[in-house]
Amino acid sequence: MSRVTLGGVELPRPLIVAPPAHEARPEPADVPAALAPVVDVLSGSTVAALTGAGVSTDSGVPDYRSPGSPPRRPITHQEFLATEAHRRHYWARNHLGWRFLRDVAPNAGHEALARMEHEGIVNGVVTQNIDLLHLKAGSRNVVHLHGRYDRVVCRDCGNVISREHLDETLTRLNPGWRERHVADVEVAPDADAALESTADFRIADCPRCGGILMPDVVFFGGTAPRERVERARAIVDEADALLVAGSSLAVMSGLRFVRQAAKAGKPVVIITRGLTRGDELATVKVEMSTTTALTYLADVL
Ligand SMILES: [Zn+2]
């Protein structure tokens, strides 16, 4: 992690560099054979699912860490709160990018997890994604560990407003802005779009108290609320096994559930492209598309 000085405040700046594309393993030609050890481990079990960005790439939501992803330097929690210039920059980019998440559709992997929940195989989904695609696919017991793109919370009074509602305000404050800048959009997993000149963007304060509005999203350097973590722990606790899909477990917020399951003697299955920080705790690790794998597992489990 590098550091950058901003307005006299020194801040950590994570630079996320994914492995090069050529390090990605080819998809297994024989899917049943590749997943046979997974079926052995999970068969007859109640399974908690932990999902990351990899499950949404086939819906067109880009991923930070799978092989071949471009390097990214996401805004941190500390930067967002440090200066209005950072908040302006964030909201200007979010103003362009958030509708992409609103309009994106779940893929067969999300649908397979929802089907397994309805059949009583999956007891719940803990997701690091903010895109709500598990809910759109029909999953019911979902913990959004890192929050959700569609809500905005006041840092000062806790007032919650919808992102749709904030959109009306930001559009009114910045007439024609989206139309002038829409060509600059580069969609990213945090609904954050790449754009340089945002100094003229007008942001909105809390309509109730005038406080700082923040998306209901856990930024780098932020922490998931305790109540949310406890609900996620309970899902893992109530299951016989943990299935990690599409996460490199690079952040502790996800890795701790792998540790929880492993410590309780529960099998851990990881299906993700590339290395993960949980590999040494995995009972079975398979590098392949989660869309393919989850669809197959929903058929055979
Ligand atoms: Zn407020």
Image: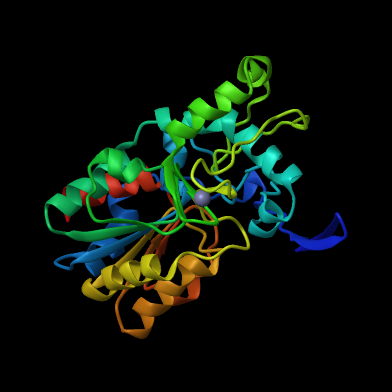
Q: From the image, which quarter does the C terminus lie in?
A: bottom left
Depth order, front residue of 78/213: 213
- Residue 130 shows in the view: no
Side of 13 relative to 39 (left or right): right
Q: Report the residue that reaches farthest toward the left.
A: 119
Residue 222 occupies quadrant: bottom right
For residue 46, above or below residue 54: below
For residue 101, above or below residue 147: above
Depth order, front residue of 299/130: 130
Side of 8 relative to 216 (left or right): right
Depth order, front residue of 36/73: 73
Q: From the image, which quarter does the N terminus lie in?
A: bottom right
Residue 90 occupies quadrant: top right
Q: Residue at x 33, y 49 (%)?
A: 293
Residue 251 position within the rendered picture, expressed as x and y whole percent measured from the top left: 55, 65
According to the image, what is the colour scheme of the structure?
rainbow
Q: Residue at x 18, y 66 (%)?
A: 46
Residue 180 position within the rendered picture, expressed as x and y whole percent measured from the top left: 68, 15
Residue 264 occupies quadrant: bottom left
Please state the total of marks drawn on the protein image.
0
Depth order, front residue of 132/69: 132
- Residue 266 shows in the view: yes
Residue 257 position within the rendered picture, expressed as x and y whole percent measured from the top left: 40, 72
For residue 3, above or below residue 112: below
Q: Residue at x 67, y 48 (%)?
A: 20
Residue 3 position within the rendered picture, expressed as x and y whole percent measured from the top left: 82, 62
